[in-house]
Amino acid sequence: MSVDLPGVADVYLHIGTMKTGTSYLQQVLESHPEQLAEEGVLYVNRGRDAAGAVRDVLSLSNRQRNVAGAWERMVGRTHAWPGRAVVISSELLSFADDATAERVVESLRPARVTVLVTARDLARLLPSAWQNKIKHGRSWSLHTYLEAVMAADADPRGSGRSFWHHHDLGQIVGRWVRAASAADVVVIPVPPDGSEPRLLWRRFAEVIGLNVDAYETNQDQRSNFSLGYPETELLRSVNRELKTTFDSETHRQYVLKYLANEVLRPDPSSGAVPDRAVLPPAVYDWAVVRSRELADEVVALGVRVQGDIDDLVPILLTDEERATVATDTNGELPAWAVRLVTTLVTRLAEAESSAPQDSAGPRQRRARPAGPEA
């Protein structure tokens, strides 16, 4: 267990996990440096070098620039902070293996290191994780993805193994307990749908000891938002058509950043709620049981839970919900619509690739303001 040392700022290390409100929390911290400083707190992730620091410590490649030494520089800024606390936040840290988690914690000593783990129930997490895969180029149907995840739960060699690498809460929390201690790990459940909008921020901020109400939490989720199910299906079909045409960087620029982030994203001014993908009842039932198992593993590890541990378990479906919940996971969009969108995106990429480097392409000119995550 860590101990408080006079003159050494405490470190709050937020490791995600993915799709658990991390971008929202990071944007609240990012947009309030002065308020944080007034409370003696530094959000050290600000600045260009911070983006590569976690990739450096995790030994992840970065195509854009060399990140060697970035973690050491971030640690230097952390140790130099004269206030009471420093916050580091990156969901990539949830990917760490045992040796890396221990190395991260030890690099921050002699500070007291408190590891914060945000977590979400599987019924809400699975559709979000599937959509994220589609945004980044996959073309699996929701049905195929769910089958792979459920099979991977029993067979870690299956194609759904990456989901559990990112979301096996018992394994992730246990790893950081071994790196720090049970007393220095806090699990923060994402509140259920319909909760007070600031509740996740409140839980997170209270662990750090922040003045919860001094922060504006209506953040613009610039690139982290939910598409509707039909839009995700269209994106999936486009991915399938462009699989052999676009490399990963071209896909990122024209399918993720332009088609998904600008064209298909919900218009926040409309007030319309996206038609989200939902789990079939049988999969939902499995998610309830598996979520309870994960929550029980967290409790058994002896860590602190900031909030209600039952928020990590989906509520049971009513008979009426069971009868009406249905997502057409095998439906196909009209072929002409997919061809039209694919052709337009391809021609946009070709036009911009042949334009002068200093010209603003159609993608930049057509950008519209982003709204909050749906």
Image: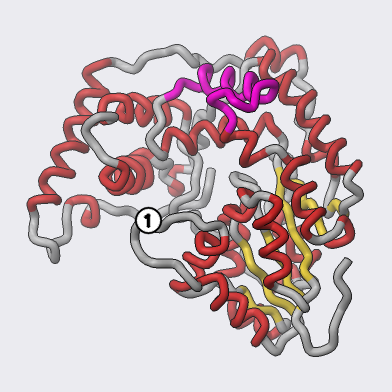
Residue at screen point 65% across, 48% down: 17
Left or right: 355, with 368 as reference point: left
Nearest the viewer among 99 and 60 is 99
Occupied quadrant, residue 263: top left
Reading the image, the residue beneath label 1 is 369
Q: Secondary structure at mark 1?
A: loop
| Residue 322 percent coordinates (x, y) | 70, 13
Residue 200 higher or lower than 184, as above or below = above
Q: In the image, what residue type sits under mark 1?
A: Pro
Nearest the viewer among 324 and 83 is 83
Left or right: 116, with 130 as reference point: right
- Residue stretch rendered in magenta on the structure: 140-161
Left or right: 132, with 65 as reference point: right
- State the scheme by which the image is colored: secondary structure
User: Can residue 32 be spotted in the picture?
Assistant: no
Q: Secondary structure of the magenta portion, mostly?
A: helix
Asked whether 35 falls inside the magenta stretch, the response is no
Occupied quadrant, residue 286: top right
User: Dot 1, how many residues are within 10 Å of its Cα: few (below 14), some (14-19), or many (20+)?
Assistant: few
